Image (cartoon, rainbow, N blue to C red):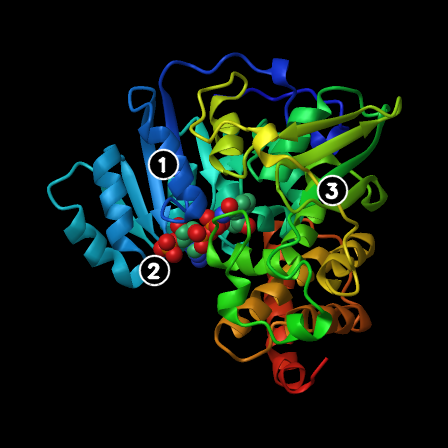
Amino acid sequence: MASAAVLWFGETMSAVPLRNSKAAASAVRAVTVLGATGSIGDSTMDLLRSSPDRYQIEALTANTNVEALAKLAIEFDARFAAIADPNRLEDLKDALAGTATECGAGESAIIEAAARPADWVMAAVSGAAGLKPALAAVDRGATVALANKECLVCAGDFFMQRAAKAGACILPADSEHNALFQALGSGSREELVRVIITASGGPFRTWAVADIEQATLAQALKHPNWSMGQKITIDSASMMNKGLEVIEASYLFALAPDEIDVLVHPQSIIHGMVEFSDRSVVAQLGAPDMRTPIAHCLGWPDRIVGPAAKLDLAKIGQLTFEEPDLDRFPALRLAYDALRTGHGATTVYNAANEVAVAAFIAGRIRFGAIARLVESTMNAWIREGNRAPLTSADDAIAVDHNARNKAVTLLPQIALKAS
Ligand code: NDP
């Protein structure tokens, strides 16, 4: 089990460890994967599959996909499998009949999966639904590889404080944050000038505003470099994902908004950089393959063998960079606004975006309206004077819930309004 770590990032950051602050992992590790049937889950299971003697699977979870969950539970001889959809419990029981795997359904079962005694937990549920399960793992002091950025965006201060209090280790699994985590060890907090998160720019990087406005779902789902789940792929196209990552970096590493820059880098080879006071910039590079940051989290504090392609810079030839265009991609500007506003504004940003993306997928709004709905929801929330510090998961969930309701109310007028 991970021990509490001492950090240079400051008190709120004591949940993200220094490399040498933890004893080496034991030979066989008990592992839980929350969101095992998703894109991150798939990459994680792929890594676990390559060293079956090293890992014992404690629990696996999914939302509705019983078939894929049961298949994984049987393959990995999982002790527990949980499906969020309560209506699928009988199907899960049938699929696991004759195996030793226990099972459960509903939100409480997902939380139970997280609370079971695994040394290492991958938190890869998508959306704000991942918050309570991730907290259940954090509260028992587990090592948590955090892919679910919405946990931090919804309840960042509170989440990190609770992790520090419980002695949990939070390992950033998101590629940019994992890159920063690897680079930050090169200097002290006092020596840090800024971090730089790279962005591919997504499929609409070179598109005119009018074309972005009308982009179709199929176009939004064509990410140039990364293969990911549907929601995050759409967020990448709007650059909302980069906005969520700016907020995520702020909470993870206790950084002010002005200490976080975004740089468009279409090749997605450099994932993150840290600039120090002597003007050294330390970067982490790798092929765009999520199995690399996940392998870093799985092996930490050591390094394990990763399956991603070897980086061949000579073949790639050129690495290019551009400033992000905040006029064509207002979602990124809104993330900085939310971070500066604080007191739940980032929760509202995320909630409104989840409503907007679902509406876009359902064909109810244009692509360009996603950022407009987020902005209108944030403005309405500020106007109504709802700002207050979030001190519990229930506070964050209440703000999330109210923001979703507000966004749903605003949806029809946003849908009618052209840019
Ligand atoms: P996917 O949509 O591919 O998978 C999501 C997983 O969560 C699935 O197992 C899904 O189950 C489960 N799930 C969805 N909703 C719920 C719910 N309400 N309750 C319980 N389980 C649920 O997402 P990704 O793997 O792409 O992303 C997961 C998280 O990781 C997101 O927060 C994303 O931002 C982050 N991330 C993803 C990256 C990527 O490359 N994909 C990169 C960096 C971060 P089911 O299969 O049954 O629907």
Near-viewer residue (120 or 360): 360
- Reading the image, the residue beneath label 2 is 85
- Reading the image, the residue beneath label 3 is 250
User: Is residue 219 left or right of 210 when viewed as pictured?
Assistant: left
Image point (66%, 80%), residue name: 410
Classify 285 as above or below 397: above
- Reading the image, the residue beneath label 1 is 45
SS for callout 2: loop
* Place of residue 104 in the rendered image (x, y in percent of width and height, measured from the top left): 29, 49
Image point (51%, 18%), residue name: 303
SS for callout 1: helix
Q: Nearer the viewer, mark 3 or mark 2?
A: 3
Disc 3 residue crowd, few under 14, some 14–19, many 20+, Cα 10 Å: many
Give the Cα separation between the discs numbered 3 and 1: 29 Å
The earlier-in-sequence mark between 3 and 2 is 2
Image point (36%, 48%), residue name: 37
